[in-house]
Image (tube, rainbow, N blue to C red):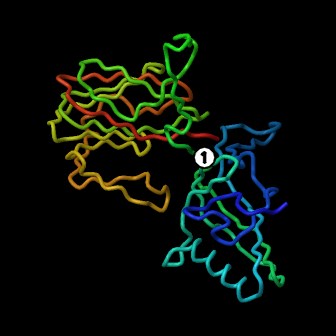
Amino acid sequence: MMKWGGFKLGDKAAKDLNLIFEYESERPIAPNTRDSTMVIDGKAGAWDFGAERDVLSFNLQCGAIRKDRAALQQTVRALSAHLFDARGRPRTMKLTFEYEPEKWYYVRYSGSLPINRIVGMGEFTLPLTAFDPDAYAEANAYDETHQYDTGEQYDSGLIYPNTASFHWQYVRHMSSLYNYGNLNTGLRVFIEGAVSSPNLTHFQTGEKIAFNVTLDKDEALIIDSDTFTAVKCTVESETYYVMAQYPARYVEYEDAVSVIGRKRGDFFQLIPGENGLIFGGVNPDAVVKYMWYNKFS
């Protein structure tokens, strides 16, 4: 069954591209695996060294209904312009489906695109590949707001909305985030303002990271467990860039100085479910901001 809508690729829905989407398109449950094994002569089977998930491929069955061949060609040209940049390279874009509009994959065109040019309709399979096979959702995508003192039990398991930022004023400050995904996910922490010897401990896992640095009120420390980087820079000196690999996830800092050499401990990620974060430091008077995504297999 074909119908309008169905998916969105980058900033355009299928309908914006004059496409009709087949809901029975191939949508894999999970990517293939890359198995690491070794076969030994004289031994049955093989040594299993584990496996990793491979890329995730989507084959979207589409149709373009137009009144004549010229109009169909216009649709084909518009789709090509959307799939490729000015240098002719496939763009990396977000792919979302209307039955899960809050989740997205980072995909690009990969393969071939023959089209059956029947008068009035062009039918084709749009091949897209997510080289990062995971799905993402915004940090606050599943937040719910609850009003207390209205008959609800305080221990009923209700979850507060995820915190985006807070004012750090105490030597030991507790904060928490809830990862609704089923995978560990990277966390970027922005500490903007005055503090000495800042450190961060994950309550559930006991993992800790600390830095032998001192921040003035106009300075910031950015800790990024996705890229395993930590830099000190001026507050609000960061510039966000849309990178080919992961759009809008990377940041460049004009006056950044790496502080990896002044780090103790290891970077850690948010685990599925509740994540208690304990901030410690000397004379803190800073704003802490979080940037992260829920992550799903």
Write down the quadrant of residue 113 in the picture: bottom right
> Which x, y percent locates residue 248?
44, 55
| Quadrant, the C terminus | top right
124 on left or right of 267: right
Residue 181 image position (x, y, % from top left)? 59, 35
How many C-alpha atoms fall within 10 Å of the one at disc 1: few (<14), some, or many (≥20)?
many
**Label 1: which secondary element:** strand
Q: Quadrant of residue 264?
A: top left
Q: Residue 202's image quarter?
A: top left
* Residue type, mark 1 in image: Lys
12 relative position to 124: left or right: left
Q: Circle 1 sits on which residue? A: 103
Residue 62: where, in percent of width, then height? 76, 67
| Residue for point 19% across, 46% down | 234
Q: In which quadrant of the rendered image does the N terminus lie?
A: bottom right
Nearest the viewer among 140 and 270 is 140
Q: Residue at x 38, y 59 (%)?
A: 241
Task: Name the one closer to the observer, 113 or 13.
Answer: 13
Up/down of 225 relative to 5, above or below:
above
Q: Is residue 173 left or right of residue 284?
A: right
Residue at image coords 56%, 45%: 136
Number of disc labels = 1
Q: Position of residue 90 (x, y in %)?
A: 56, 70
Residue lying furthest front? 150
- In depth, the one of 212 and 82 nearer the eye is 82
Residue at x-position 54% and y-position 34% = 184
In this picture, is 40 found above or below 96? above
